[in-house]
Amino acid sequence: MEITRLSSRGQISIPKALRGRLHLQPGQEFTIESTTDGALLLRPAKPGSNEVTLDEVAGCLRYAGPAKTLEEMDAAIAQGVQDQGHVRR
């Protein structure tokens, strides 16, 4: 476990060993969350992980085949969930 300190400007330095192990670079962005038990979770933000809405991306991919039925779309979604290892409860 590494120990670091909060500066008077509200900054925390990540120790060099951790930066190297995690391949962190200057300018890296992070997400930070507070848990119910008072812990802080700091995670590197994935490049391009900015949230977008469906309205922003709808229609950006072309599809040249016949329209899919709702049943076909539901089956494709179920297959995708199963392929990712998620279980629907």
Image (tube, rainbow, N blue to C red):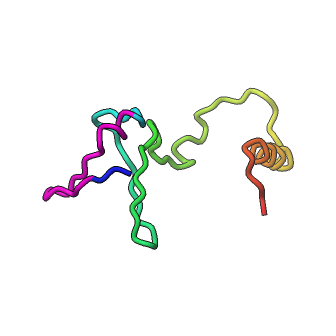
Quarter of the image for residue 67 reads: top right
In the rendered image, the residue lying farthest to the front is 1
| Quadrant housing the C terminus | bottom right
Residue at image position (34%, 50%) is 2
Q: Position of residue 1 (x, y in %)?
A: 38, 51
Q: Is residue 57 left or right of residue 78?
A: left
Q: Is residue 22 left or right of residue 75?
A: left
For the residue pair 89 and 78, the one nearer the viewer reads as 89
Residue at image position (71%, 30%) is 63
Number of numbered discs overlaid on the protein picture: 0
Q: Is residue 43 left or right of residue 74?
A: left
In reply to whether residue 14 is colored magenta, the answer given is: yes
Q: Main secondary structure of the magenta part?
A: loop
Residue at image position (25%, 47%) is 13
**Does residue 87 sit above or below 68 in this rendering?**
below
Residue at image position (79%, 29%) is 65
For the residue pair 55 and 39, the one nearer the viewer reads as 39
In the rendered image, the residue lying farthest to the top is 64
In reply to whether residue 30 is colored magenta, the answer given is: no
For the residue pair 72 and 62, the one nearer the viewer reads as 72
Q: Position of residue 85 (x, y in %)?
A: 75, 47
**Does residue 87 sit above or below 77 in this rendering?**
below
Magenta segment: 4-20
Q: Position of residue 84 (x, y in %)?
A: 72, 43
Q: Position of residue 22 (x, y in %)?
A: 42, 37
For the residue pair 23 and 55, the one nearer the viewer reads as 23
